[in-house]
Amino acid sequence: MNEQIIARHWLALIAPKAAPALATSTVLILARIWNANGAEHSLGNAVLMTALSLAAAVAGACASIGRAGDPVTAGTAFAASGGLALAGVAGYADGLSLPLLLWVLATTAAYGLAARYWRADRRDNVAHERHVSGRREEHAHIERVEALKAGAQIEVARTGAAYAEQLATALLTRAALPGFDPTALHAAGLPELPASHRDAT
């Protein structure tokens, strides 16, 4: 019931939303550094990046086939394939317009894919919160019912104790009255008093 409230830092809230843009921007920056260091119009580098990108795409396709397909592995492989393709084009091209266009397309695609996972994660979180809230309400209801039962039992015990005390006081008062004779009551057919009261009189 008393759960610790943890306030998340604003960077922890923003980081997942900024991750796709940071990833594609990092690939673009590294590719342009690579371009400046001799990758521009290098056919060998272009072939290498094309082969790596195709290999990552094939790995993603293999990871997503069949019942044993792993969507996380497939998504990672396809993301690596796209990143390698972006890096290859940005490193090979001589101008900046084509790499920037590809960066915009890759960032848009990354946000489109990430939005699906964010929605699914949000749905899971909402379902979990509803389940936890329902369990809390159920436990709170059970606690209230048990508290009411305990209170009723305490009241019954208090009432019984008060009744026993009043009965004992009445018996003692009746025994102290002048002219009280328990044998006369017994002879008249009235209920017999307990032995303790007869001994007391």
Image (tube, rainbow, N blue to C red):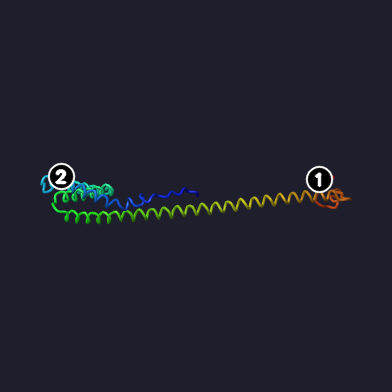
At a point 55% along the width and 51% down the height, the residue shown is: 143
Identify the amino acid type marked 1: His
Is label 1 in a helix, a strand or a loop?
helix
Q: Mark 1 packing: few (<14 Cα in 10 Å), some, or many (20+)?
A: few
Is label 2 in a helix, a strand or a loop?
helix
At a point 54% along the width and 52% down the height, the residue shown is: 142
Would residue 64 appear left or right of 177 to someone viewing this image?
left
Q: Is residue 143 visible?
A: yes
Question: Nearer the viewer's eye, disc 1 or disc 2?
Answer: 2
Using the image, tell me which numbered label, if any, was put on residue 33.
none
> What is the count of numbered marks?
2
Q: Is residue 65 visible?
A: no
At a point 22% along the width and 54% down the height, the residue shown is: 106
**Whole-percent x, y for residue 169 in the image:** 79, 49
Q: Mark 2 packing: few (<14 Cα in 10 Å), some, or many (20+)?
A: few
- Identify the image quadrant of the C terminus: top right
Would residue 104 appear left or right of 179 to someone viewing this image?
left
**Whole-percent x, y for residue 30 in the image:** 21, 47
Q: Which residue is situated farthest in the front direction here? A: 36
- Do the CB atoms of the residues marked 1 and 2 lie less than 8 Å apart? no
Identify the amino acid type marked 2: Asn
Residue bearing mark 2: 37
Label 1 and label 2: CA atoms lie apart by: 114 Å
Residue bearing mark 1: 197
**Whole-percent x, y for residue 107 in the image:** 24, 54
Front in this rendered view, residue 109 or 89: 89
Front in this rendered view, residue 61 or 12: 12
Front in this rendered view, residue 121 or 192: 121
Sequence-first tag of 1 and 2? 2
At a point 46% along the width and 54% down the height, the residue shown is: 133
